[in-house]
Structures are given as C-alpha cells and as structure tokens.
Image: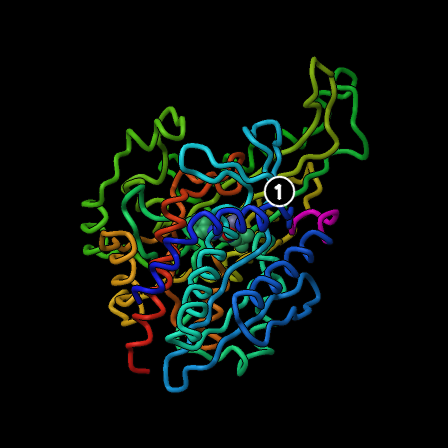
Amino acid sequence: MNNVIDFIQVNRDRYLDELKALLAIPSISALPEHTGDVRRCAEWCGDEMGRIGLQNVELIETPGNPVVYGDWLGAPGAPTILFYGHYDVQPVDPLNLWESPPFEATIRDGEIFARGSADDKGQVFMHLKAIEAHLKQNGRLPVNMKLILEGEEEVGSANLDDFIRANKSRLAADVVVISDSAMFARGVPSICYGLRGLVYFQVDLRGSSTDLHSGSFGGALANPAFVLAQMIAQMKDRSGRIRIPGFYDDVRELTAEERAAWASLPFNEKTYRKDFGIPKLAGETGYTTLERTWARPTLEVNGLLSGFTGEGAKTVLPAVSMAKISMRLVPDQDPNKIADLFQKYVEENAPKTVEVKVTRMHGGKPWMTSFDNPFVQAAGRAIEKGFGRAPIFTREGGSIPVVSTFQEELGLPSVLFGVGLPDENAHAPNEKLDVGNFHNGIIASAILYDEVSRLKV
Ligand code: BES
Ligand code: ZN
C-alpha cells in the first residue's frame, strides 16, 4: 500500500490540473443547449478511464445521456466493487453571484471553486486517481472494480433504473461505493447511512384566459397568485406538520439510540444559523435541526411564479400562477403513494374559482442501512487512515435515488463515503471542494479498495 500512497503524494499537483480539465466541461443535464457538452464530458471520462488502465471502457447509450462504463476484473476470488458517480452538473444561474467563472476552476484559500467540484466530478475523479495509483504502481487492483458514471443524476435519473435492470449480470458485484455526499464538518469525516427520498411536482393554476386590468376586474374573480399562496399556506400547520391526510402513515420514527447519538455530535445551531445567514431556525416542533433534516419528511416550495415581477408597478390580475413543490421522504414512505396523496389533496382543495393542473416530475425512494455491515466497517478503517480520524455515522437530507435501486434490483449494499463539506455550495453559486479533502479522499479510496479486498465474500 505504501507505494500507492507515495504515488498519490507525488502526483498531488497533477491531479488538480487534470481535475480542472474535467471541470471545464459544462455538462449541465437540465439544459438542452448543453446536450453536446454532456456527451463530450462522457467521452472525456471514458478516455480518462482508458488512460488510467481500466478495461472494457464503453459509452452505453440510453434514451437520454450515455452511461460511462469501465472495469478491471483481474482479481479472481476477490470482492467486486461497483462504483457509481455522476458526470452531469446543475445549472449555474445566477451567474453574477459567482466570484470566478463556474467552468474555469480556480483555487482560492485551499478550495477548488467550480460547478461540479464537489457534486460530483471532483469526488468521482478522486476514485479514478486512486485506481490509477494502484494500477500504475502494482499493475493490478486488490479488488475487482466496475464503474458506472451517469449523466442524468441532477435531473432525476429517468433512464438509470431501466439501465440497471437491463444490465444485471454485467453489474453484478458485492458492494456499491458512492462518493456524492458531504462530510459532517471540516475535519470530521463521516459515512452516510441514510438518504431521504423525493417526490417533485409542478402545480399550475389558471384564473382567467388572459391577464386582466386589476382595476376593471379586481374583486370579480379569484386571483390565481392569491389562491396558490393560500393553498400552499394550508399545506402545513403551525407546528410545521404537513396536513396532507395519510402523509405520515409510513414514517419510521427515530430510535432513541439515533437521537442520543446525534445529540452528541459537534453541531452548533448558532454557528449553522450564522454560516447560512438564517435569521431564526424553523421546523417541525419536537425535533432538533439534525433530526428535521436527516430523519423527518418535509414539503418545500422550490419555486413560485405569477404576475408582474419586473421593476416598478403594474396593475394587473395574473391569469396564471405556478409553483414547484417537492417533498423529501424518509423510510418507509413510498414516493408513489405520497405522490397520489399530494395530487388528490391539491385537486380536492383547489377552489372552483381556478383551473388546476398537477404535474408529477421525478422522484426516488428513501434509503437506510445498518452500519455494522462489514463493507461500512472497512470504509471506516480506510477513512481513519486517510483522514487521521475515525468517521462518524450520519444520515443526509439529500437524495440519491439509485441507492435503493442497487439494493432492490442487484441486492447490493452501498457505502456512502463523501468528502464534500456542508458549506460546499452544491447546486448554488461558488460550489467548491476542499483540496485537502480531495487529496485525503484519494488516499482513503485507495486504502478502501485494499480493505475491501480482505473481506470474505
Ligand atoms: N449529491 C447530491 C445528493 C446529496 C445531497 C447527498 C446532499 C447528500 C447530501 C445529488 O447530486 C443530488 O443533488 N441529488 C438530487 C436528487 C434528485 C434530483 C432526484 C437531490 O437530492 O435533490
Ligand atoms: Zn446534486
């Protein structure tokens, strides 16, 4: 192992230069004008997999963006790791809030700033460099590895479940490794054992066939902006509980052990509030902030649009209003069931004064694993060696829907070892990855493969 770690130390600066090239490709999956860039990024990743010595590299077509596949299967009898990551990124707007251009990676104060630095290109690249170090130094990996990189994670992975179902034998493995999450805090590495699920909707209301003069017509009909605001306001009660009938039926309660463990984590609500400029924290009564974000379901408005929003004033009754509304789900809530409840609730509660259209968008199941599984323990040892500190076990509020697909379709456990930070600005301006975490993450990943190779499967 030492020669592998030496290689990683010596190549530290080269890794950053190469990562910059990957981060320069604007692979924004949400925007059709970037479809070509997304494909270019897939090709870049495939070329890189070949360069580092992976075999059977292939861009596998889907109805959407290609999946990049590569493997190294030269360790018969040893375990097989299936690595999953994504090469697509979120849009960059509002562009004017970026301190350096989102696709010109810039290092400031020990952080590399660029869209995708943390979510997820930087963390994918960390594993590619760990693999490269083994292959260049030893000509082999201690385990078998299969890698799949997806190009549609940020838009809901519409084609990934079908891809996995169609490639079950090709993807057969013993464990899935994913680095697409954050550490608990700077200097506090963690392993994530739970993710929330998601259901996402667009709600459109129409109050008239065209915008109307608010003087001539105001008072005669319902204003769809007002109706939508009222409907949204009704969705939660004063204690922050969601009022959709049946919403909480399948929620798995927190255990006393989890509550006690989380209460002892180094989390300071005041610092959290200050770090993110939040005047006062708010949420469901009876739960702490970590409990609210990791283990309780939520309903949030992601966007709201209606009427005149330009400069100055315009006296108008908008014809339409629109909201993007999503719910984060926890075990054992089922996205389909919750989606049906939400749709029914909105349709039944919309007043007759407006036309309502409810459109279901993407979603995914929540996921949770026990952390006494030997792969998680192996990752714990690797992280301790790479970061000089044993990881703590956390859940996360975000979603990686494919994790439950791996469990259900391939019967595979997942190990979520992320090296981002809570203030990494994922999905926001000035996304960044700590250079030290990236570097230690390469070392920990290289050690992880070695630790996994010692497990009996
Ligand atoms: N890297 C995130 C997932 C994540 C976020 C894990 C925070 C842990 C903490 C991933 O790229 C992401 O943003 N996922 C989407 C999924 C959705 C589009 C189905 C999310 O959580 O919104
Ligand atoms: Zn993301």
Residue 246 visible in image: no
Q: Residue at x 40, y 56 (%)?
A: 195
Is residue 132 shown above or below 280?
Answer: below
Report the residue at 74% width, 21% height from top. Answer: 316
Q: Which of the two residues, 142 or 69, is positioned nearer the viewer here?
A: 142
* SS for dot 1: loop
> Residue 335: x, y in percent?
50, 60
Q: Amino acid at mark 1?
A: Pro
* Percent position of residue 391, x then y: 26, 54
Q: Is residue 184 left or right of residue 152?
A: left
Is residue 33 in the magenta section?
Answer: yes
Reading the image, the residue beneath label 1 is 91
In front of the other: 149 or 143: 143
Q: On the rendered structure, is 441 left or right of 319?
A: left
Tell me residue 376's x, y (percent).
30, 66
Closest to the observer: 67 or 360? 67
Residue 207 in the image: state x and y as whole percent.
Answer: 73, 34
Asked if the residue at label 1 sits under 8 Å from ligand 2, the reply is: no
Task: Decide whether residue 218 is among the magenta residues.
Answer: no
The residue stretch that appears in magenta = 28-35
- Image quadrant containing the C terminus: bottom left
Colour style of the rendered protein structure: rainbow
Instruction: Write the residue at 69% across / 58% down.
Output: 39
